[in-house]
Image (cartoon, rainbow, N blue to C red):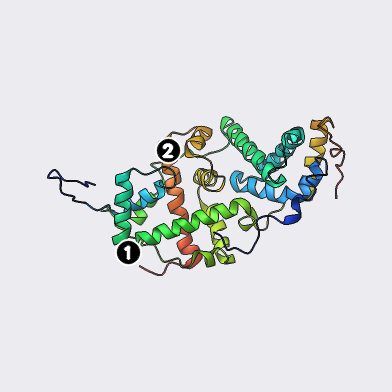
Amino acid sequence: MALVGQNGKIGISMLSCKEASTLYLDSHDRPLAFRERLGLRMHLMVCRLCPRFADQMNLIWRACAQAAHQPELLEEHVELPDEAKARILNRLASQNGGTGPGDPSTGAEDSS
Amino acid sequence: MTSNPLSAEPDNVDRHTAASPPSAERWLTAHGDYLYRLALLELRNEAQAEDAVQETLLAALRGYAGFDGRASERTWLTGILKHKIVDIIRRDKREARLDPTPADPDGSPDIDELLFNAKGDWISPPADWGDPDQALEQKRFWEAFATCLKKLPAEMALMFSMREISGMDTAEICKVLEISATNGWVRLHRARLSLKECLEWRWLGKTEK
C-alpha cells in the first residue's frame, strides 16, 4: 500500500479484503503502525463485507472473555466428579501432611 | 459492556473469606467445578484437568499466607490455576505427549484459500451475525461455539484458548509451546478464521452468498 506518491500527492492503493481482515486480527495482538491503521480504516469505510467480519470477530472475542469467567457456558455438562474430589482431598492430605499454615482441612478426605 | 443477565460469580461464594481458615474441601465445593471446567477448556484431558485442580489447591494451601483477600478467593485460585495449566502443558511438551501429529503449516487445507480468492476478495463472504448482545444470550450460540472449539485441531485449539480465553501474551505462549513466533501466528490466525467459519455454518447456517 502506498499512501504518498512521489509527487507528494496522496494516492492510495486499497487493501484487499484478505489484507484488511488479517490486519484486523493483528490489531488484537499488537499495535498497528499508522499506515496500517489508516489503510484498515479506509478499507472498512468502503467495503461491505469486512465490517461484518470485524463484527464477527468482536463477538467471538466477547464470547471468549465471558467464557473465561463462566466456563460452564462452554463446558455445560462437565462437573468435577465426586470421586475425583475425594481423590484430590486424599492426595492433598498425604502431600501436604497437614503442615500447611493453619491447615485443619486436609483430614477431610471423606467428603460425600 | 455485557448485558448478560448471568452474573459471573455468586455473591455468597466468598462470604467465608474473612473468617474461615483455608480449606481444600470448601474450595472444592465452592470452586471445584469452575476450576475443572477452565482447566478442561485448555487441556482437553480429564486426568490432566483433575491434576491441575489438585496442584492449584495444594499451592493455595501452602501459599494461603500470601492471599491478601483483596481479590476474591475465586480470582486468586484462578490465577494459580493458570500457572498450573501452563506447567502441565510444558511438562507434556517435554514428554512429547501433546501434538502427536506435528504442526502442519503446509499439510492441512489452508483456511485462507477457502475464504479468499487469489486477489484477496472474499469467496466465502461473512454473513451478518446480527445483534451481539442477543447472540451472547442464545443457548444455540454457546452450543455452536463449544462444538466449533472442540472441532479445531488440537494444536490450534490450544493456541486459541491460551490466547483468547486465558488471555496470555502471544510471545509467552510460543515460548511455552516451544514454537516460533511465525508458527504461533499462523496457528492463531487459522484458529480464529476456522472458528469463525465454523460458527457461520453451525450457529446460523450460512445463507448469504
For label 2, the crowd category at 10 Å Cα-Cα, with few meaning under 14, some 14 to 19 and many 20 or more, is: some
Percent x, y of residue B140: 56, 66
Percent x, y of residue B176: 53, 34
For residue B131, above or below residue B76: below
Q: Is residue B42 left or right of residue A38?
A: right
For residue A44, above or below residue B75: below
Residue at 45% x, 39% y: name it: B184
Mark 2 vs mark 1: give the one in front.
1
Query: Could you confirm whether marks 2 and 1 are on the same chain?
Result: no
| Quarter of the view holding residue B82 | top right
Rendered image: mark on residue B183: 2
Rendered image: mark on residue A8: none
The amino acid beneath tag 2 is Asn
Percent x, y of residue B64: 75, 36
Rendered image: mark on residue A48: 1
Front position in the image: B74 or B171: B74
Q: CA distance from mark 2 to mark 1?
A: 31 Å
Q: Is residue B123 left or right of residue A87?
A: left
Secondary structure under the numbered disc 1 in the rendered image: loop
Give the residue furthest to the bottom. B207
Residue at 32% x, 52% y: name it: A40
For label 1, the crowd category at 10 Å Cα-Cα, with few meaning under 14, some 14 to 19 and many 20 or more, is: few
